[in-house]
Amino acid sequence: MADNLNLALEVANPAFKDDISKWECLVPIAPMNSHCAMSGYLVFNYMYSLCDGKLYFPIPKDGFQLRKQILVHILKYEENEAQNNIPYIERSIIDRIHRWTFIASKDGPSRHA
């Protein structure tokens, strides 16, 4: 596979002369969950948290917490068309959940859901 990719990259960019089969294989330390139905939530949270090769937000392994984080992210999304239809009290609860679940590290990026 690496040989075929090298050939394809040389065709796409004749200046490419690197041999990818000699590249170091880096496997990041990632949270795991044995419940496959939660894998999509886990992948989303991992992608949301990852920046510059570091995880800046805690990623829960619990299915309830994973689903809660994705729901809060969707509800807090700035282009959520239904956001104005959410009553103020519920929005304040969602804001608190957002602060509790997406806590950035001190030197990490600030993310707004």
Image (tube, rainbow, N blue to C red):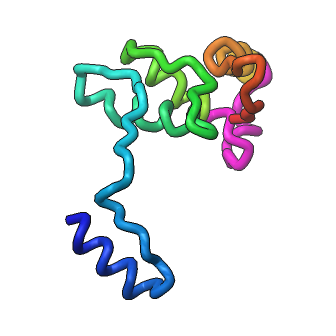
What residue is shown at x 73% (from left), y 23% (from top)? 91
Task: Report if residue 81 lies within the magenta region.
Answer: yes
What segment carries the magenta color? 74-90
Front one among 30 and 89: 30
* Residue 11 located left or right of residue 74: left
* Residue 62 located left or right of residue 68: left
Query: Where on the picture, by quarter, is residue 94?
Result: top right
Task: Report if residue 61 lies within the magenta region.
Answer: no
What residue is shown at x 23% (from left), y 70% (from top)? 3
**Quarter the C terminus occupies:** top right
Query: Where on the picture, by quarter, is residue 92?
Result: top right
Query: Where on the picture, by quarter, is residue 12?
Result: bottom left
Front one among 103 and 97: 103
16 vs 30: above or below = below
Image coords of residue 27 (percent x, y): 37, 35
20 vs 77: above or below = below
* Residue 42 located left or right of residue 99: left
Image coords of residue 50 (percent x, y): 56, 35
9 vs 25: above or below = below
**Quarter the N terminus occupies:** bottom left
What residue is shown at x 35% (from left), y 66% (from top)? 19
What residue is shown at x 63% (from left), y 25% (from top)? 56
* Residue 84 located left or right of residue 50: right
